[in-house]
Amino acid sequence: MSGRPAESEPPAAVRTRGGPSVPDGSDAAPRRGRGRRPAEQVRADALRAAGGILLAEGLADLTFDRVAQQAGVSRTTLHKWWPSIGALALDGYFHSVEDALVFPDTGDIRADLRRQLDSFVHIMTETPAGRAVLELIGRAQTDRYLADAYRRLYSSGRRALAEERLRRAQELGQVRGDVDPQTVVDQLWGAVYHRLLVPDEPVTRRFVDGLLANLFDGIAARDASDVRPSAPVASSSS
Amino acid sequence: MSGRPAESEPPAAVRTRGGPSVPDGSDAAPRRGRGRRPAEQVRADALRAAGGILLAEGLADLTFDRVAQQAGVSRTTLHKWWPSIGALALDGYFHSVEDALVFPDTGDIRADLRRQLDSFVHIMTETPAGRAVLELIGRAQTDRYLADAYRRLYSSGRRALAEERLRRAQELGQVRGDVDPQTVVDQLWGAVYHRLLVPDEPVTRRFVDGLLANLFDGIAARDASDVRPSAPVASSSS
Amino acid sequence: MSGRPAESEPPAAVRTRGGPSVPDGSDAAPRRGRGRRPAEQVRADALRAAGGILLAEGLADLTFDRVAQQAGVSRTTLHKWWPSIGALALDGYFHSVEDALVFPDTGDIRADLRRQLDSFVHIMTETPAGRAVLELIGRAQTDRYLADAYRRLYSSGRRALAEERLRRAQELGQVRGDVDPQTVVDQLWGAVYHRLLVPDEPVTRRFVDGLLANLFDGIAARDASDVRPSAPVASSSS
Amino acid sequence: MSGRPAESEPPAAVRTRGGPSVPDGSDAAPRRGRGRRPAEQVRADALRAAGGILLAEGLADLTFDRVAQQAGVSRTTLHKWWPSIGALALDGYFHSVEDALVFPDTGDIRADLRRQLDSFVHIMTETPAGRAVLELIGRAQTDRYLADAYRRLYSSGRRALAEERLRRAQELGQVRGDVDPQTVVDQLWGAVYHRLLVPDEPVTRRFVDGLLANLFDGIAARDASDVRPSAPVASSSS
DNA sequence: GGTTAATCGAGACGGTACGTCTTGTCTTAAC
DNA sequence: GTTAAGACAAGACGTACCGTCTCGATTAACC
């Protein structure tokens, strides 16, 4: 990401911003004279193009070259502002997608987590943004600029919001005080990410139910009535 | 890739097979005549080279070109056997690393999970194989061939082993019968993968403790004694 | 030039070979499949395009990029065969221009030199090849690949032919035996090149007359009748 | 450029002016405020930088960019004052090199020419200025602005000086009155330039001797004693 | 056991992208 | 109003890799 003013980016509800995010899918360059243009306009054009390609075709088809052509921006300029294509993709993602930061607080922690997880699962499985986020996480494994920016602009903020909500539940006696909220984050959202990144098993409503039930009720058998001799509930394993 | 802080590896004991997995680090091609060689020998050379580069330098530096040169195999042949560099990398990984799929069964499910998770965390955070697995998962987001092969050859088998062990625990009344074992897999190993893939938080022994405690004991407060007004336990959040 | 089979290249009369040396001036690429084409065809296409651009527009407008586009050849291939654009230009020149090696030998050395010089001057001042040669000599000052190739393929051969003819004249007693033929070459063709490269003065028939007269008759006054008080012959200096 | 065997320099004594012509080899810009500076100071800084780079590294490494950075002058300003990098290079050359245009006149024309030619050859073959002049002549083939400036500022003046000296010799009866002095210039200095620009043959003292001997004595055999059956004098041809 | 067919190595090629460099234009702000 | 600072489009450079294709050599299987 380099020394750019960070665009802050937030947890939860994500929505594609404006239908025509991709202004002209026809890869047409505006064609201007050589001189300088205001930096803001150039940045906006580049981000719009990058976000559009990312959401429409995926990260593998996103290159500096294509962004330059589609946005009418020179490659040199792109390299000056973004150190890697992954960093540009992430910025383009935030520019094209509207994240609703709000984390519901109705007083019922389990219901609020359920709502939040449902929204999250919806976005990840039903919108182009889902695939984009997975590809960004994937690319971040070999692009440290992207990895840094992703943590700074995206994941750390979402973690903080979830922790905040969980701490309030602890204060109200709804969640045990000796529980580390960050570990809960990994066992809810992290578990979903895992199924999305390595899709052996489907991400369903029943799965989200199971995540919350396991965590809130515990998986240890409490009394004999729980003991059942054989497979009690249909597993989704093949 | 390069530059990334190396991290880790997969569930169940993994061991690098044979010190000199990388036959000749000097990138020297054997130089043979043109004729045909036994397919097995060609495959073995290619896999050895691919695995060596993957573990030593990372997936980003692994190309068909380099494997061809280092293994003395023609690019044409590589393309014939593997549909993408990711697929070749995965095969090379298995050729260079010996996975012990064994899952301990001492009768104590929580202790067995603990041992298995500790081994997993060790490999993922302390050996080159860990970084390789993360990079493979990452690349699988944009490489269909790799994604398919990864599920078929790797993750599904590990899921099955864990499920098997958990079902035995259910039969012994140690785990509630209405719990879906696959969901537990995502809340244990999946949670670890999440922290490795998006490293906002460190993967420590305390973290593993928390995973098991949350899951076995539940996070819901059981009685008034659990209720505490403010942050009771040090969280690892920054 | 590199390790290519040298195309031998010769002194004297140069003629543009075939009107449509530039096959399709419309910068249109043929567009073929990806596979390999015979090296000879690729080389011929590249040379035709390079020669065409050089003669039609000059060396300054000749780039690897344009040759690649016009010839339907990839830049990579051009770089493999020619180490610099100058080297490619020289090869393209020889491919597009037909050099008549013949050096006349009528027995009259002065008349033969006159004919040869007239041909040379004609080509250098009246045909596109003249400008091309001057630009190649110019570029050779900062392109050692071009400089080497130019000497090897062009100038040394022309020097040798001229020397051969002058030596025959020496053997016949028409030229003094203690004269170095190579020095004469510089005082005839070299003098012409000088006027062409630094055009303070025009290259005219009278100039060629003067070159031969000065050299054959000497410029030293032989007797008093030669002495004249002021400017005896109109000088072309401005 | 680079890599070229350095060669030489121009007629009449040329001397590098001031050891530290290159102000600070560390390519460090002085860093000033934005406002206007006296035009003379700007010009001087630019010329000093241009001349330094030209003499130290050659014309190929001289760019507007580098001059701007090294001189602390903006590219905009350079473009305003000089129409091409060649034109700037030429101005920079004159700013860094002190040309003594004096032409000796001892009364003996042949001895004076000999001295002048020796100085010229020395500068062209033994000093950095020599290479610079050859590169300027080379670039002038494709840079109209440089070509015009070179003739106007450099070559025409030198031609005039030589002509002046030769005319005095004609008036004294040392040189035939029907000889065009400008043609003699091309057969002496022009011949040397030719050997420098297309270095098939070396530029030696013997070569300069030959130039004068051929021209003053003529190359035509005067009597039978000159006739020799085979190669009489060692030629430098390979 | 010799012929034939499959397979491999070698490497040329078009194509795409990369990251860098240079040029010339243009904008803005300082002087 | 001139200048510096600097952003930008344009386009070339040289390199890397991919995927395809051709060719020749060799081996293995078939007859």
Image (cartoon, coloured by chain):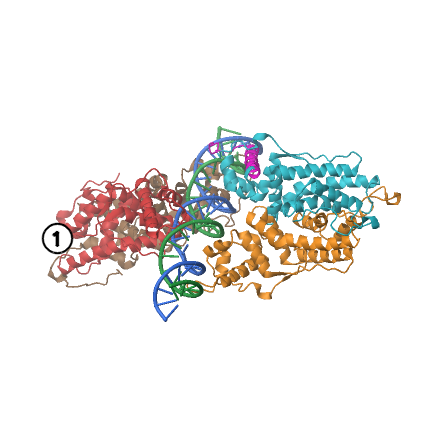
Chain colours: A cyan, B orange, C red, D brown, E blue, F green
Q: Quadrant of the C terminus of chain B?
A: top right
Q: Provide the residue designation for mark 1.
A: C106
The one nearer the camera, A213 or B118, is: A213
Percent position of residue B145, x then y: 55, 49
Q: Please say if A129 is above or below B7.
A: above
- Asked if residue A53 is among those painted magenta in the image, a careful observer would answer yes
Bounds of the magenta span?
A: A28-55
Q: Residue furthest left?
A: D224
**Residue C177 image-quadrant placement:** bottom left
Residue D214 seen by the camera? yes
Assign a secondary structure to mark 1. loop
**Chain under callout 1:** C
The residue drawn where x is 36% and y is 46% is D136
The residue drawn where x is 50% and y is 63% is B41
Give the amino acid type for the residue marked by disc 1 in the picture: Thr
Percent position of residue B16, x then y: 62, 62
Q: Please say if D227 is above or below B223.
A: below
D14 left or right of A215 in image: left
Percent position of residue D202, x then y: 30, 58
- Asked if residue A169 is among those painted magenta in the image, a careful observer would answer no
The one nearer the camera, B13 or A93, is: B13
The residue drawn where x is 22% and y is 54% is C184
**Residue B157 image-quadrant placement:** bottom right
Give the prevailing secondary structure in the magenta stretch: helix
The one nearer the camera, D36 or C34, is: C34
D9 left or right of D167 in image: right
D175 left or right of B53 in image: left
Query: How many numbered markers are drawn?
Result: 1
The residue drawn where x is 86% and y is 43% is B227
- The residue carrying pointer 1 sits among few (fewer than 14), some (14 to 19) or many (20 or more) residues within 10 Å by Cα, namely few
Residue A222 seen by the camera? no
A144 left or right of D75 in image: right
